[in-house]
Amino acid sequence: MDAIDTSAGIFHFMPISPRVITDASCLPATVSCGAARRRLITSWMENNMRLSAFAAILGASLALIATQAQASESIQGQWYTKGKRAIVTIAPCGQNICGRLTRFIEQPKNGVTTDVNNPDPALRKRKLVGLPILSGFVADGKKWRGKIYDPESGKTYRSIVTAGKNGTLSVEGCIAMFCQAQTWTAAK
């Protein structure tokens, strides 16, 4: 009788797919080839299912941690504009965040209290108090992106607002890739 070398065992596990067992690789006296194939495939499937479950749990955990780490800080509240000339109240408006001019601390130049610089003649009679200054802001990582209206020029700009340290907001108005920033402070 010929000696059969079984030092490597009957099965050879591969990380991606099972080795195909040929009739010559089966041990005819002890294990049928069909049973060996079933055990090999079952074991391979169990290992892959465990690995897949672990990868899914790990991926979900990392996604949750990343979402929490990048959550935007709230910008809601009442804020003094640059130079404490006015107060803007930032609050939800629908699914977005918006800001309205709540009141003047320092009266506008020329005593004008309406939106006289608006390019739309139909909007020039709107009162500045209550006027939407910030509109359509949505969270984007640690920043909020939307639009800002400047009643002094009558122009609307792309805007980025970021909650700063010490209870401040960095409010940027942008044209193309050039931005100009102001620091707003919390109104107490």
Image (cartoon, helix red, strand yellow):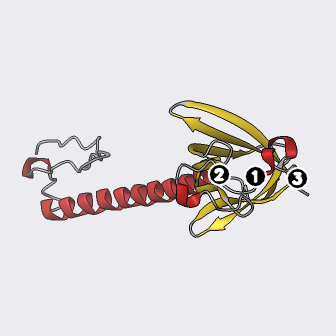
Numbered circle sitting on residue 112: 1
| Quadrant of res 158 | top right
In the displayed structure, does residue 47 sit left or right of residue 95?
left
In the displayed structure, does residue 160 sit left or right of residue 35?
right
> In terms of secondary structure, where does tag 3 sit?
loop
Numbered circle sitting on residue 105: 3
Callout 3 amino acid? Ile
- Pointer 2 local density, CA inside 10 Å: few below 14, some 14–19, many at least 20: some
Residue at image coords 18%, 43%: 4
- Pointer 1 local density, CA inside 10 Å: few below 14, some 14–19, many at least 20: few
Q: Which residue is mark 2?
A: 116
Residue at image coords 28%, 63%: 42
| Quadrant of res 131 | bottom right
Disc 2 to disc 1, C-alpha distance: 8 Å
View extreme (top): residue: 178
Q: Position of residue 93 (x, y in %)?
A: 62, 68
Tell me the quadrant of the picture where the N terminus can be found. Answer: top left
Q: Position of residue 14 (x, y in %)?
A: 29, 45
Residue at image coords 14%, 63%: 34
Callout 1 amino acid? Val
